[in-house]
Image (cartoon, helix red, strand yellow):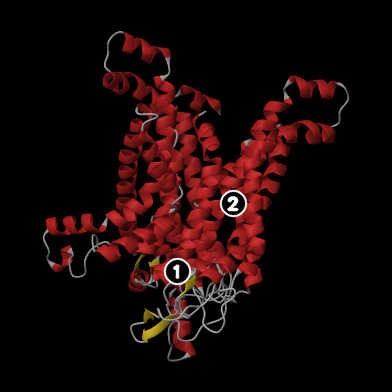
Amino acid sequence: MPTYTARRIVLALLLVWAVASAAFVLTRLAPGDATMGDLWESAEARDAARRRLGLDQPLAVQYGRWLAGAVRLDFGESSLFARPVADLVGERAVNTAILATAALLIAALLGVGAGVYTATHAGTWGARAARAVSVLFLSTPPLVGSLVLVLIAARTGWAPVGGMSSAGLSSAAGASGWACWIDLLVHLPVPALALALPLAATLERVQSQSLGEALAQPFVRATRARGVTMGEAVARHAWPVSLGPVLGLYGLMIGALFSGSFVVEVMTAWPGLGRLMVEALRARDLFLVAGTAAAGAACLAVGTLVGDLVHAALDPRVREAR
Amino acid sequence: MTSARRALILLGVLGTLAVIGPWLAPYDPATTHRGYWHAPPMWPEPGAGFAFHPVVLEDRLQERFAVDRTRTVGWPWTAGEEPVFLLGADRSGHDVFSRVLAGARVSLGLGILAVLGATALGTLLGTLAGARGGATDDLVMRVADFVLVLPVLYVVLVLRAVLPLVLSPGLVFALMLGIFVLVGWPLVARGVRALVARERSQDYVVAAEAAGAGAGHLLRHHLLPACLGHVAVQASLLLPGFILAEATLSYLGLGFPDTVATWGTMLREAADVNELSRFPWTLAPAAAIFAVTLVTNAALQRDSDREITT
């Protein structure tokens, strides 16, 4: 197990390094830089700004400096926001994490609940309806889902559209902690649902099928024959057995949450990592692009790593395979 | 019907739609109909022999239209001077229906070509890895694993941002196709490799080999036919993702320029919440994306469900 763990951590670090370096080098090679959008009094002023940002140095020197800083968690300063990249990325990563966690919780509750229902009520109209809804949600990618939810929210006024908090309501403005939390909760449903619904549908399909298979096993029929009620047989015997395939979706979920949150953040103006990345790319903000790419790769790598390690801890075949 | 046949029919139908779509459009997708900015969708009236009542601009500032019930005009393909918008008009007075059809060629066409490319590359590398084994297998599968764990959207964004913002539509098409094939092949390759490796040790293949069949013959007549069903299903399931990727990139302004009608560039109009809630028909391309995804899932999802669980 320690060897397996060490190996996976090294691979994760390599991935983060490779993605961040590629982002840095490619952005630097791209035409234009962070000083191109502004109006300058003279060519000298612009040259001075480029010197201050280190943009006049050769690529290798710039990359070396950036890497030397990055291993000490100093990712340079964003020219777009005039703030350290690490601070910016940290704030935005928390926002993305809030969104992703909420979506994962919603997806798990809805999906597993609906899956258990359709498996235990197979053949009824309720199960058929749930299944039809599930196919619909499965085909609603976050891009489409967030547009539709924004439309519904804007027309009915059930939820505020866009952003993470109401204007003027922030802890800095002196609002109380509770007000801020409630405000956040009100803003959460639109992006979180857009992200969660297709995932919930995937979970429902897999949970329903695996529970259906578990219910057909002889040991479940044997418990029923001993007089155990249906509810108890499902809850204590069949459902735990059926969880394997559902947990196996974990990696798929992390990937879907990750790419989905990117789209949803842009569509609903949620101030997360994905949005930051788009802003940074548009402004050719070199350090910020590399920083967000590193943070994004790190989030994905940690998510996958946790899943793999838990899987390996539970199943010896995985850690002995390679 | 086998799932492989369903997948091939699906690709065929959608491919045909991509080819003939623009020809079915009643209007040139680039024509701006003056005075019809944000005109609402029009319905065939059962009371008037399924003809249309024309809309007349009532308030130019509010972009409010009134239905003129005293007159009727025919279907858009046959209508005369007055345009008929089945799915309404957009900000500049383009016919949304025509643009969805015209955009199908770019969005669907790009998606299908990317599916074919990823399938070809994935099958090639997968068979190579599965049939050769050893170091080749290790190398191909390591690269595939690496591509699979990449945060694809970030990589695509950075790759796209490296290039100048303004590129000709043809170049954008070729670039996106290349990127989609590069990120799509590992899924196909993984499945093909597993199947080839499994089939290779089956009695019938061993027998053919013992009878003197060469590597090429084995591949053509035994190993590849065994993979066909799996490849067709897996590849078709990539299609919605590719269509979505085009839409996302174009929506972000990193895909096709606004002058080209694609499902992604059309959605840019929906970015403004006010306009979206007042003129919801600008969501028509999102409905098209949803429809393609739904058809793909309905045709193939059951098979892939079984694959996930086993």
Q: Dot 1: within a 10 Å radius of its alpha carbon, few (fewer than 14), some, or many (20 or more) residues?
A: some
- The answer to which of B141 and B278 lies nearer the viewer is B278
Residue type highlighted by circle 2: Val
- Of callouts 1 and 2, the N-terminal one: 1
Q: Quadrant of the N terminus of chain A?
A: top left
Viewer-side label of 1, 2: 1
Residue A69 appears in view: no
- Residue B183 badge: 2
Residue B152 sits above or below residue B302 on the image: below
Indicate the amino acid at tag 1: Trp
Tag count: 2
Q: Are marks 1 and 2 on the same chain?
A: yes
The label on residue B43 is: 1
- Residue drawn at (37%, 80%) of the image: B66
Nearer to the camera, A238 or A9: A238
- Mark-to-mark CA distance, 1 and 2: 43 Å
